[in-house]
Amino acid sequence: MLPVLYSFRRCPYAMRARLALHASGMGIELREVVLRNKPESMLAASPKGSVPVLVLPDGPVIDESWQIMLWALRRHDRFGWLGKDEAYADAATPLIVENDTTFKDNLDRYKYPGRYPEHTQIHYRTQAETFLQQLENRLRATPYLLGDTLSIADVGVLPFIRQFADVDKSWFAQAPYISVQHWLKDFVNSECFAAVMKKYPSWQPGDAPIIIANKEVNSC
């Protein structure tokens, strides 16, 4: 039996989990869900009701994307995303925490300003730019966030930067974050990104399983 991953294609949390599973070469059964109609089996596994949710064959459930990434890469880290003795994972943790809290809060408000009328959309974008500038400073010094090679830090953050960039593509294209722009462009043009962004039909109980082998990738 394979692990079962409940996912939503465009969710950045689910995206980074799929990227780590893909890079690990681990096969999964993919269940693409409709968030407004979440399957009962997913809610039974993880009552919090958000994706991703990874149900392991022997029963345990991992329902935090960062933990799914660590779980997959600790089993097979083909491209060294964790670093020696998991040094990259340790170094990435403060970035991931800021990404998943302060930046994500501002990103949500920037993307959906009508839900947060306390401030303008520009205000929320400006607040989010604090994190972008931090990334820009790192990427001016090295090609990737933690050095010369892609790591779990990049993969953990990039899906959220992609979402931010898509809110106002014209603004982002002329914003003073040249290194972030190039870093993001390389990511969305990569084989790994193309592989995990393939479209699959939404899953319903009784459907034939969609098996993702994750063995063909040679580089990310």
Image (cartoon, rainbow, N blue to C red):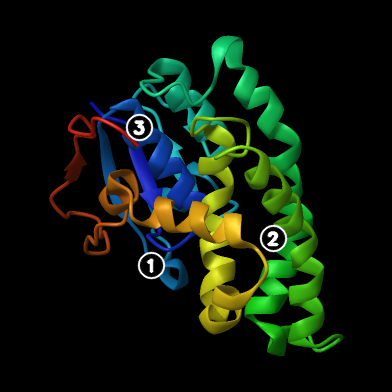
Identify the mark at residue 34; answer none if there is no mark.
1
Q: Residue 49, relative to residue 37: is it above or below?
A: above
Instruction: Give the Cα distance between marks 3 and 2.
Output: 24 Å
Label 1 Cα neighbours within 10 Å, binned few <14 / some 14-19 / many ≥20: some
Q: Residue furthest left?
A: 208
Q: Are marks 3 and 2 in contact (CB under 8 Å)?
A: no
Q: Nearer the viewer, residue 15 or 191?
A: 191
| 194 is higher (above) or lower (below) than 214 | below
Q: Earlier in the sequence, mark 3 or mark 2?
A: 3
Task: Check the image and name the residue furthest to the top.
Answer: 85
How many numbered marks are there? 3
Does the CB distance between marks 1 and 2 fall below 8 Å?
no
- Return the mark for residue 175: none
- In the picture, the disc for residue 104 is 2
- Earlier along the polypeptide chain: callout 1 or callout 2? 1
Residue 133: image x %, image y %? 75, 57
Taking 172 as reference, is 74 left or right? left
Name the residue at 47% across, 45% down: 16
The disc at residue 23 is 3
Residue at x 27%, y 64% (from the top left corner): 202
In the rendered image, residue 195, in percent from the top left (x then y), is placed at 26, 48
Q: CA distance from mark 1 to mark 2?
A: 21 Å
Helix, strand or loop at disc 1? loop
